[in-house]
Amino acid sequence: MKLEDMERPDEATSATSADPSTGNAEQAIDESSDVDGDFANLQKMLSQRRRAAKDSPEARLLKALPCIKKFSPLVRPLSISDLKSAIALENAAFPNPDHRASLEKLEYRLSVCPELSLGVFVTLVPEQAKALGIATLETANPVEGGRADGAVSVLLAHIVSTRCRGAIITDDDMAYPKEWRDRARRSGQPVGHYEAGKTVGVHSLAVLPLLHRCGIGQLIMRSFLDQMSGCGLVDKVALICQEHLVAYYQRLGFQHLGESKAQFGGGGWHDMVYDLARHRKPSL
């Protein structure tokens, strides 16, 4: 704080400067201690801001990926060509094998309804990134057009979904018809993707462990919710999560409906639902 901005002592309550001839001591208020305190508070505030900047999601991301100067992700729907990377990401993101989507389920979902998936990609040069421990680097596809340095498009996070028969996810929604490649047979099956469903069930939100706490999960989920809201074909987005993640999804706008009846991966899940109509911005 500048000295001229500080409140000055009222003349009626403070003595004037002492007259040496009278021997009176100086009685004016000493403002130096207030200035020192304000300066110390300012220094503390600036120090806290610097620490916060160093520990921001963007700073953590650039620290995790030192081979890039600026994070410029590509967010797009997944396709069947991303299957190997999606499998590698599932295996890396979920320590419990029972919580991972199997090869068969991923192949089914990326073949039948790829428009209900989303991936966050970043361009990396394998030679520069090989020491970073990126689980999806080896399965990454070359960038379009190819580059002399062998740059590839690396999957950092994904969401994989289907349409559900009800307003929440059930075990039948998470299953898949074993004969799904036969279009005539799969259409009548009571499990898996339901084309007429008004609720999208998110079966997997996976982020590379290397990039946890870097804001990637929020980035892809918000992008996905915007995509589902914009298409105008569904009313809700549902998912199941473990109890320790309930608050995380609530911060993203999901409503907690209580414990889920789904027993996938051993159970212990909670139902979360995002009402697209309630969050949809009114048109201008």
Image (cartoon, helix red, strand yellow):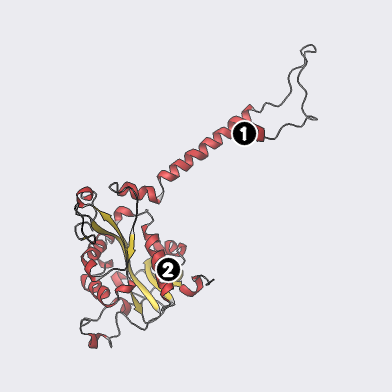
Q: Which label was assigned to residue 2?
A: 1
Q: Amino acid at mark 2?
A: Asp
Residue 1 in the image: above or below residue 261: above
Q: In which quadrant of the rendered image does the N terminus lie?
A: top right
Secondary structure under tag 2 reads: helix
Badge 1 density bin: few <14, some 14–19, many ≥20, Cα 10 Å: few
State the residue at coordinates (59%, 30%): 36
Foreground residue, 191 or 208?
Answer: 208
Q: CA distance from mark 2 to mark 1?
A: 47 Å
Q: Position of residue 130 (x, y in %)?
A: 20, 50
Reading the image, the residue beneath label 2 is: 226
State the residue at coordinates (74%, 22%): 27
Q: Position of residue 218 (x, y in %)?
A: 40, 60
Q: Choose the circle earlier in sequence order: 2 or 1.
A: 1
The quadrant in which residue 86 appears is: bottom left
Secondary structure under tag 1 reads: loop
